[in-house]
Amino acid sequence: MGSWDLIKGYTGSTDLDIEPRIAMQIVNEASLCKNRVRRKNYIAHQGFELLNGLGFLATDEHVHYLLDNYTVCQAQELQGTLAAIRLNNGHYEGDIIAIDPHRIVSTTQRVMPKKKKQPGSPSKKMLQTFFALNTQTGQPIGCGIGSPGANTTKATLDLLNMVQRVNKKALILADKEHFTEKLIRGINQDYQFEYLVPVISTVRIKKIERSLSYKMQWAGYGVAETVFNFSRHKEKYRLIVQREGETEPSYRYKSFLSLSDKPATTLISEMYRERWSIEDFFNFDGAMGFDRASTFNLNIRYGKMSLALLAQAASYQFRQKLPQPYNRWNATHLSDAVFNKIDGDIRVKDDTIIITCYNAPEGLNLQENYQNLPEKLLAQRINPRAPWLYNFKVDFRFK
């Protein structure tokens, strides 16, 4: 995917500079589902620093000062370029994209209001993030962060600007938090996206729901449509309402606002259910850096999450080489079973770093994919030299 070039572009550095190597450590820490890998951790004595082309482990201060040198815009550009590369590599399929607000528990020392991630859970400090994901493959396109200066509407529009680089005419499946007049008007006027968002149930909406005539689709399920406009706004939108229940006392309503011409039943009973693939992503890959936050400095937070997206993309490609059921291991399981727990040693022969892995599970087919790696890469017209390892080749042996 050209990860090294992406990192060099983000840091504005060359092959010989230290900054991209510290960034590479951040990427590799994310693949291990670790917030940090430091000297007190056992892996520090097994050559983790060498993996990043360094003779030492970067400290928290190293990482903080590195990321503090770059802006939010630079991190967003990194995400956008990565998404374009992933599109070319076939990581995104179909025309449905889910967007979702995702609250991350934070350990920041800032004085700030606490919020609940779940209704029954205790209140904690939270970082509000927003993710966009291709529903067919379950792969993220990019992420953003909400803040006092970037509310849901602004953060979502920034995210959709990134989504445009992947698919300008996708159907966007949103969450109730995205039901805002300004956001919907902005999408309708400035983008080619189709849009489907649940409507917040207000007194006015409830009155509309009860007044409509429903066309029965099957027993206990009916659908109706009408024209809707926000109070004190003249723009007209399509309002789709589903009704469940056999008798009036048991009726349950759910309404959606749509910027799509697709049939109502297709949108709400078939397509919208695909939005839950984004929850699968948080459960599957959240441990790679999307389930925790310390500092609230936006440029630093954007930098860490953007570099974590690099790790997630690389892990996705690695899974494509694994047979079932190993290709369905979540990030934590993959890290524990493969990246962390296989013994090995490292030696150098001529211009090649040879890594010998001992007792790797045969079912993973690692030998088939990674032994004689330089030759395999050359056959794919890929340069086998790793520039962050000072242009050495890397090869593997399995015993």
Image (cartoon, rainbow, N blue to C red):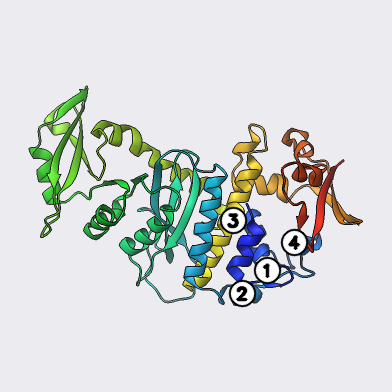
Earlier-in-chain disc, 4 versus 3: 3
Earlier-in-chain disc, 1 versus 2: 1
Residue 141 position within the rendered picture, expressed as x and y whole percent measured from the top left: 48, 51
Nearest the eye: 5 or 323: 5
Q: Amino acid at mark 3?
A: Leu
- In the drawing, what numbered circle is on residue 66? 2
Label 3 sits on a secondary structure element that is helix
Could you tell me if the residues under marks 1 and 2 are in contact, i.e. CB atoms within 8 Å? yes
Disc 2 from disc 4: Cα separation: 20 Å
**Pointer 4 residue:** 387
Q: Is 41 positioned to the left or the right of 311 in the image? A: right
Q: Is 387 positioned to the left or the right of 324 in the image? A: right
Disc 4 from disc 3: Cα separation: 17 Å
In the orientation shown, which residue stands out farthest toward the right? 349
In the picture, the quarter occupied by the C terminus is top right
Disc 1 from disc 4: Cα separation: 14 Å
Disc 1 from disc 2: Cα separation: 8 Å
Nearest the eye: 192 or 209: 192
Q: Amino acid at mark 1?
A: Ile
Residue at left offset 60%, top offset 45%: 316
Residue 282 position within the rendered picture, expressed as x and y whole percent measured from the top left: 49, 49
Label 4 sits on a secondary structure element that is helix
Asked whether the viewer can see residue 296, the reply is: no
Residue 112 position within the rendered picture, expressed as x and y whole percent measured from the top left: 39, 73
**Pointer 3 residue:** 310
Q: Is label 1 or label 4 in front?
A: 4
Earlier-in-chain disc, 1 versus 4: 1
